[in-house]
Amino acid sequence: MTGRREGKMRSGLTTGSWAATLLTLALLSPLAGVAHGSGNPAPTSYRFAPSPTRGDNATCEARYARAVSELRRGMVTGCLHSLDDAVVRCDPSSAPRASASDAAIGARASFLRARVLLLDGDWAAAEEAATAAREWSAHRALSDPDATHHHRALDAADAIIAEAKRVRFLHDAAVGAAREFRHERAFWTAGEALRTSWRSYDLLIVRAKAGVELDLYASVRQDVARALKIRPKSPDALRTLAEALRRCVRTTRALELSAGVLRECLRATPDDGGGRRQLRR
């Protein structure tokens, strides 16, 4: 019965599918076909260009292509760095030599950056990036009212901003429910938020801790594993796993494993007082 309940409670994408999903975001940008300020479609070879080497002289197209390549390989942090680079280098306000074509690439980079940040749970930054992309699209829509892709881009930016606000509200509600010991509500609310921000470390930990209180070891183990992929050797994640082993499994072997996890936590973070206190129990 417990296993069936846990199966229903799991939500979000598996770790095996997230890289492909991230790449899909890049290729479904509302500005994916725009290479020039005129709105002309980009050639197919550009959209799937190989990742070039880093360099200050790289073109805006090359910078964006590098970000997409890194996304394809699941290198989310590297992708965000490349997108930051593209936004700064291709924005006329910060790069006076940037052309209209460069500005279009910068807007695409902002859209993709907003979507990746939304998945990562950095909601404020996602809103900021979507707002930047929206401003460019609004300007282009005014100068070319018949360019429907710019109007679609405005709608897409508004959708990202609204979703970031919604998921941030869910996160805050889950944290509040956990503080009030309403663990089932915290679990379900965090799970709903994870449907969108499924790479959010904070949401994974909130749901994992609620899962400990609900005696859902398999769910906790899955959430902790995903959290550790995002932040390897995280003391909070390791302590949560140790607590789940101690309270949910309740066997001699589980207690030994729990102590081993805590010792690993202290090796990674010697000054972690929480892990030290747990180990003394």
Image (tube, rainbow, N blue to C red):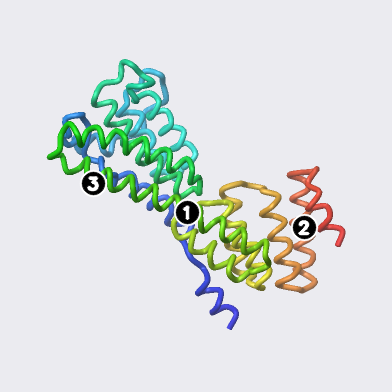
From mark 2 to mark 3, how far is it between C-alphas? Answer: 53 Å
Q: Position of residue 70 (x, y in %)?
A: 41, 39
From mark 2 to mark 1, how far is it between C-alphas? Answer: 31 Å
The residue indicated by pointer 2 is 260
Among the two numbered marks 2 and 1 on one chain, the one whose residue lies closer to the N terminus: 1
Disc 3 + disc 1, Cβ < 8 Å = no
Q: Is residue 65 above or below residue 175?
A: above
Disc 2 + disc 1, Cβ < 8 Å = no
- Dot 3 alpha-carbon crowd within 10 angstroms: few under 14, some 14 to 19, many 20 or more: some
* Displayed quadrant of residue 108: top left
Q: Quadrant of the N terminus?
A: bottom right
Q: Residue furthest top?
A: 97
Q: Nearer the viewer, mark 2 or mark 3?
A: 3
Q: Nearer the viewer, mark 2 or mark 1?
A: 1
Asked if residue 281 lies left or right of residue 172, the reply is right
From mark 3 to mark 1, how far is it between C-alphas? Answer: 23 Å
Asked if residue 82 lies left or right of residue 252, the reply is left
Q: Nearer the viewer, mark 3 or mark 1?
A: 3
Q: Amino acid at mark 2?
A: Gly
The residue indicated by pointer 3 is 152
Q: Is residue 15 above or below residue 28?
A: below
Query: Which residue is pictured at 52% across the width and 74% down the height?
Result: 7
Q: Nearer the viewer, residue 162 or 193?
A: 162
- Dot 2 alpha-carbon crowd within 10 angstroms: few under 14, some 14 to 19, many 20 or more: some
The residue indicated by pointer 1 is 197
Q: Secondary structure at mark 2?
A: helix
Q: Residue furthest right?
A: 280
